[in-house]
Amino acid sequence: MSDPVSSIRNLGPAFEQACARAGIHSAEELRQLGPDEAYARLLRAGTKAHFIGYYVLVMGLRGRPWNDCKGEEKKALRLRFDAIKAGNSAAPENKMIADLDAIGVRVAPQDLKQV
């Protein structure tokens, strides 16, 4: 049995759910992808881009506390985050789901019908 995403330091149930929506179902898979590809997948699956979420992921995969990210290291991660954010966005269907979720309407991809 593989370890859940939430077994990684700093990552809780909400992050685990976001990973599942992005097709990432285990800590091992997340480690294999690495933080940049994993975060890109999260964005394409509709997760809202947030720098803190990105560096929490990076620090967790390094086995470090999230608030250990400071100074030049944090500046370098900000550049990586900005590049990932610029190159990835939610597909229209997933963006719609994310937008509906933002206003409190919960739907799943299978709930949407092609027109």
Image (cartoon, helix red, strand yellow):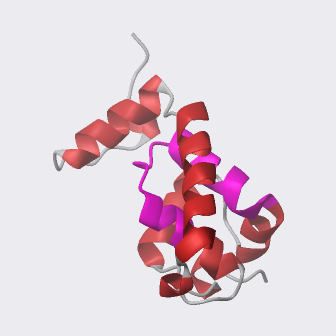
The magenta region covers 33-57
Name the residue: 61% across, 43% down: 84
Q: Relative to 77, is 50 on the left or the right?
A: left
Q: Relative to 90, is 22 on the left or the right?
A: right
Name the residue: 35% across, 38% down: 97
- Give the image quarter of residue 107: top left
Give percent across and percent down for residue 13. Answer: 45, 77
- Give the image quarter of residue 86: top right
Give percent across and percent down for residue 108. Answer: 40, 43
Residue 43 sits inside the magenta stretch: yes
Q: Nearer the viewer, residue 36 or 28?
A: 36
Up-down: is 16 above or below 12? above
Q: Relative to 100, is 21 on the left or the right?
A: right
Principal secondary structure, stretch drawn in magenta: helix
Residue 50 sits inside the magenta stretch: yes
Up-down: is 97 above or below 48? above
If the image is split into quadrants, where does the C terminus sit?
top left
Name the residue: 43% across, 49% down: 49
The residue sitting at the right extreme is 32
Name the residue: 44% across, 66% down: 52
If the image is split into quadrants, where does the N terminus sit?
bottom right
